[in-house]
Structure formats: structure tokens, C-alpha cells
Amino acid sequence: MVEPGTNWAGNVTFTAGAVHRPTSVDELRRVVAASRSIRALGTGHSFNTLVDSPGDLVSVAGLPAVIELDTTTAPSRPTVIVSAGLRYGELATELDARGYALHNLGSLPHISVAGACATGTHGSGDANGNLATAVSAVELVGPDGDLVALSRAADPDTFPGAVVALGALGIVTRLTLDVQPTYDLRQYVYDDLPGDELRGHFDEITASAYSVSLFTRWRSEEVEQVWRKERLTAGQEPGRPPAVWHGARLAEEGRHPLRGLPSTSATEQLGVPGPWYARLPHFRLEFTPSFGDELQAEYLLPREHAVEALDAVAELRDLIAPVLLVSEIRTVASDDLWLSPSNGRASVAVHFTWVKDEAAVAPVLAAVEEQLVPYAARPHWGKLFSTAPAVIAGLYPRMDDFARLRAAMDPGGKFGGAFVDRYLPGT
Ligand SMILES: Cc1cc2nc3c(=O)[nH]c(=O)nc-3n(C[C@H](O)[C@H](O)[C@H](O)COP(=O)(O)OP(=O)(O)OC[C@H]3O[C@@H](n4cnc5c(N)ncnc54)[C@H](O)[C@@H]3O)c2cc1C
């Protein structure tokens, strides 16, 4: 056991008593059964108190690593069973070496699979669901130390509640993920997309590649960078994209999402083809920082309101720009996972990387949230937000179903904590 310490960003000091680090599932089961109150700690990349527990924390990172590819029982739908504490970066390279791939990745490869899926972590792409949508089965340790298995096929009534579950149903030990044959992408960056072009052609722009990210610091009408990640078809030579596209200029040198910073830490651009895991994230595996001098917030709203909502945020330009490092705008496909921020609606995700000054950021965050009220914006569960619990409850049509599932799976509230008890109402 070790002291819990802080989250990755260092803005949350965990108040839990200790962190257990079991090295086997049996040991984990004993730890959970003996505990009064316990929550799972992933890699600690969330920016709020979501992880914290009034009792202890437990990390599954020390359980034996598992990557079991299954391409035989369902050849048309290959899957991989992974240990919950595995990080996406570790999984991705191993999966690729065996000829398979995930449908998408978030911007950071250092987060754990279970931690990312628990919050509905996402990448970008009109047709790409968040990372949790790849999960077809979970195995978790329930409050009595019992092992519980749930799957998309066998438990259609409850499984959609058990994937993005904020750690409130138990400690996940394994997940089964949908995979597909490996693929390559190439990425190009365009500079200075005029605001009017974005307004007039939002759907066309986000549909222009497999994954599209827009970066702005809200300092002007223009979107500073558009990152287009194009999926390549074997044997097809796609040709060079136009030098000017929607009024934006094709970058002739590598870019960092934060204009002006050297591109050495960014994934390769300028159209050089590369494997999915080396193009979908914006940052190279080997350059990921181990701690963060930043805070983050993000809101997901129905994509049909994207232009209006972005205009509403832009009204706060003078308030936002001084405390912002950069904003990223992405799209996420609709899904059926009860607590997923993109549940039931194709979404646009408006992300803010703030300077690490919570006092200065808090009023700006509240102002942004106020602007986004008309668009039913759902905050990212793992980032900063101040939306009231009653408002959050009203944003999730299946919230009551989740409360019932939680009451059934964890009747004593062993996996509760101040954050989840505040935002996930009881039955
Ligand atoms: C630099 C940076 C970049 C990011 N980029 C993105 C991005 O591109 N897209 C995006 O959507 N988000 C992004 N995030 C947010 C991040 O993906 C989420 O906060 C994610 O949940 C962090 O995963 P983690 O492993 O660190 O989990 P933690 O933060 O440790 O935990 C998150 C939740 O998962 C639960 N959990 C963890 N392990 C288990 C388990 N074994 N069983 C049950 N529950 C468990 C915890 O209890 C907690 O509720 C980013 C964060 C950072 C710091």
C-alpha cells in the first residue's frame, strides 16, 4: 500500500487512506471484500475528484497483463480481452504487431483502458463512437469480492449501463474490446480556417476525414489549425490534398496543436502514411509528459447545434483567451451507453485546455457553461465542471436506470465517493 498522492495534473490531492496494489485477481477480491469503502484508481488523468474515495483506492495496474486476441470464434468480429490497467499505448503497439487495431484513440496514450472507458473518453470522427463503444464485455469485482461478468450479447438490458460507470459498480479487472484489421492513416494540417467557412460548412469539414480536430485559442474568428487524419485503403494512392481548402492553407511544416511550439512531440504530419496508433493521437507515444501543467474541461452537445454553440462560446472570447492554452473541437458518434456524454446523440465536443490556475479558470468555466445551457451540454466526467447535479441528471435519459443498476450491484454503496454520490442520484 502507498499514499494516494495526487492526480496527474496535481490539482487534486486524494483524501483516500491508501492505494492497494494487488498483483492477482484473488488478492484484489480479498482487498475489496475486506474494505468498507473503495474506489478504483486508473492512471489518475482525470482533473476532478471523481476518483477519490472516503475509504481506500485500488489500482489494478499490478494485475498480470493480459492481451488475448480472439479472431477465431467470431472471425468477422475479432475481439481482444485486455487487463483493465493496461494503458492504450501498450495495447496499441502489441495489437498492431499482431495485425489488429482499435477504431480510435484519445489524444493521450498513457491512460488506462478501464479508466478511459469508465468516463467515456473519446477521440474524434463523425462515425467514431467513444472508446467505451468498443467494449463488448467487462469482468469486475463486486462489493463482496465476487467476480461479475457482463456482456453486450448476454446482458443487453444492463450492459449499456455498466461500461461508462465512473467506477461506481465495482473494480473492473478485464474488458473485451472490438478490434479490426490494422490500418494506416496520413494526416495533414490546415492553417487559419476562416470562421465563415466553418459556420457555412461545419458538416462538410468534420466529414472530410476519418478523424478531424479543430484547434483555436478563441483569439480571432479563424480556427488556427484543422488536423485531418485520413484513413488509407491498401493499394490506393490518394494524392496530395489541395493547397487551399475552405480558405485554409495546407501547412508545409509539422505543427504542434499549440501554435508556435515545436512539432517534435506531435505525431507525424505532411501526409506521411503511418499505422493507426501513430496517427490517431496528436502526440507521439514516447513524448507524452508524465505530469501536467494544465487543467481541462470539455462539453459534449448535439452536433446540430455546433455552429450556434461555437458562436455562443466565441462571445466570451475576451474572457476565455487570457486563461486558455488551447481549445479543441471534435465530433463523436452517438451511442447507447447510459452515462456516455454522447448517449443518444451525435455530438460535437468543445474542449478547453486551461492554464493551471483554478481560481482564475473557475469564473470563466461558469460563464462558458452558462452560454452552453441552451444546448444541453454534457460535461466530460473526467474534467472540470460546475454544472449542478440536478441539471446533469436531467441531461441523461437513462440516469434512473443507472441508479437502479447501481443499487442492485452495489447496495451498500461500497464503490461510492463524494463525487459519484453527488452526481449519480440514488434510487
Ligand atoms: C493530457 C490529457 C489528455 C486527455 N485527452 C483526452 C481525450 O483526448 N479525450 C477524452 O475524452 N478525454 C481525455 N482526457 C481525460 C481522460 O481520458 C479521462 O479523465 C480518463 O478517464 C482518464 O483515465 P485514467 O486511467 O487516468 O483514469 P482515472 O482518472 O484514474 O479514473 C477515471 C475513472 O475511472 C475509474 N476507473 C479506473 N480504473 C477502473 C477500474 N479498474 N475499474 C473501475 N473503474 C475504474 C475511476 O474510479 C474513475 O471513476 C485527457 C486527460 C489528460 C490528462
Image: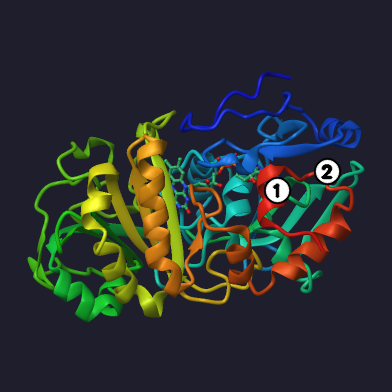
Q: Is residue 110 above or below residue 153?
A: above
Q: How is the image coloured?
A: rainbow
Location of residue 62 (image quadrant): top right
Q: Earlier in the sequence, mark 1 or mark 2?
A: 1
Task: Mark 2 and ligand 1: say if the CB distance to the nearest ligand atom is below 8 Å.
Answer: no
Badge 1 density bin: few <14, some 14–19, many ≥20, Cα 10 Å: many
Q: Residue at x 51, y 56 (%)?
A: 380
Left or right of residue 209, residue 381 in this image: right
On-image quarter of the N terminus? top right
How many marks the image carries: the answer is: 2
Left or right of residue 280, residue 3 in this image: right
Q: Position of residue 393 (x, y in %)?
A: 64, 66
Task: Depth check: give the residue in front, 401 or 141.
Answer: 401
> Could you say which disc has been placed on residue 414 in the image?
2
Q: Is residue 157 above or below residue 53?
A: below
Eye-nearest disc, 1 or 2? 2
Q: Residue at x 58, y 65 (%)?
A: 391
Q: Position of residue 165 (x, y in %)?
A: 69, 56
Name the residue beneath numbered marker 1: 167
Task: Mark 1 and ligand 1: say if the CB distance to the nearest ligand atom is below 8 Å.
Answer: yes
Q: Position of residue 182 (x, y in %)?
A: 46, 58
Location of residue 401 (image quadrant): bottom right
Q: Residue at x 72, y 42 (%)?
A: 417
